[in-house]
Image: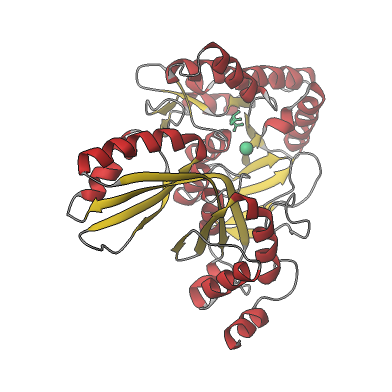
Amino acid sequence: MFLAVEKYGGTSVGSVERINAVADRIATARQRGESLVVVVSAMAGETNRLLDLATKVDPDALAREMDVLVSTGEQVTIALLSMALHKRGIDARSYTGGQVRILTDSIHGKARIRDIDAARVRTDLELNRVVVVAGFQGVDDDGNITTLGRGGSDTTAVAMAAALEADECRIFTDVDGVYTADPRIVPEARRLDQITVEEMLELASQGAKVLQTRSVEFAGKYHVPLRVLSSFEDGPGTLITHEASDMEQPLISGIAYNRDEAKVTIRGVPDQPGAASRIFGPISKAHLNIDMIIQNVAQDGTTDVTFTVNRDEYPEAMSLLNKTAKELNARDVVGDDTLAKIAIVGVGMRSHSGVAAMMFETLAAEGINIELISTSEIKISVGVNDKYLELAVRALHKAFGLDGEGTEEQLAEAKDS
Ligand code: ASP
Ligand code: MG
């Protein structure tokens, strides 16, 4: 039988009406003869509400208790959705992450899935039940509740699909697919029919919020057929493909951004073996996510090292770095928490030169100063002051022809001039 894992995000289950609408959708899929595992998020706003409550009690609450708290959001949704399914005469069973046995490591708030023991789910499916699973959560070896980081229900869904070798994993959300850019910033942005998993991975890790990065990694690693679609309207959505199609690849497939960035620089670091490892050791121990590492060419025996972190991890990064600076006898530490990151992504970059130059020219023409640059094989990202974010994204969307015109000609023009 065709097995689909469907995931419904917070807005898709944000009210009783929405939960009923999801139950109707599931009933329709059952009529098509599909076997279903459904992963749900907390109702819209619920995770934030819980986080706020905790902050009021203790802004430094233990991560273990934070996970006990925020995992309750999803537990509400699985129960309500199962009830709505029962009401429609559908046999359904709800499970928390721990009950399914989604085993994770013990890094509370950012846990990674290690293993899924899906025996129980398989038994239910054989009994023709719809299995409703709480997203975003798991359990560690000692039985502690863990959570997978914001947006983690996507990863639960893809991991379940991988464990069950599902025929398709559908991520239902409030947009009808993956866009060339955030339509709230670029009204001309277009839905993509398909995108390669590696492009999606870059877009997600550079700030596109539509899928959690980890979920795309899972999809790539286990070849999970993945589709992003809207639970509010019918449509084909966007298919995440595992091979680039024969279709002519556009130069750039999409633009992602992240407004909540910060940069920190440790200056005057003695230029010796081991300095970088002394700088990044404590950062990695604290599980801070860093990006865009830049080390300058040494002058007079010292060098500067800059990197970016998420803005909410900026204070911790600064204090760790200040400590390291003392130990290393570095001159000082400076930082700026008004940074935004913008990335252009496309597998077409592999076979074309001049993309970086065109990106920099476009930003220059708008008078936008580039503070940091980093590249990969299929991505170029820049750090700019966050006040330029919208302007930069719009200008790049237009320059690379994502508004609808061809890109090849524009690239040729850019190279000629
Ligand atoms: N409820 C969690 C969050 O808001 C997980 C999710 O929705 O994917 O981040
Ligand atoms: Mg989400």
Q: Residue, x 78% and y 56% (percent of image)?
A: 187
Q: Which quarter of the figure has residue 359?
A: bottom right
Residue 71 placed where, x, y %? 55, 20
Q: Residue, x 21% and y 56% (percent of image)?
A: 271
Residue 11 placed where, x, y %? 73, 32
Q: Please tell me in which quarter of the rendered image ligand 2 is found.
A: top right
Q: In which quarter of the image is the C terminus?
A: bottom right
Towards the viewer: 30 or 230: 230
Q: Residue, x 64% and y 84% (percent of image)?
A: 413
Q: Residue furthest left?
A: 273
Residue 367 placed where, x, y %? 63, 66
Residue 96 in view of the camera = yes
Residue 79 placed where, x, y %? 66, 17
Towards the viewer: 93 or 191: 191
399 sits left or right of 162 in the view? right
Q: In which quarter of the image is the N terminus?
A: top right
367 sits left or right of 350 in the view? right
Towards the viewer: 198 or 246: 198
Q: Which residue lies furthest to the bottom in this view?
A: 416
Determine whether 326 is above or below 344 in the image. above
Towards the viewer: 132 or 334: 334
Q: Which quarter of the figure has residue 203?
A: bottom right
Determine whether 42 is above or below 394 in the image. above
Q: Which residue lies furthest to the top in this view?
A: 57
Determine whether 75 is above or below 165 in the image. above
Determine whether 314 is above or below 65 in the image. below
Q: How many marks?
A: 0
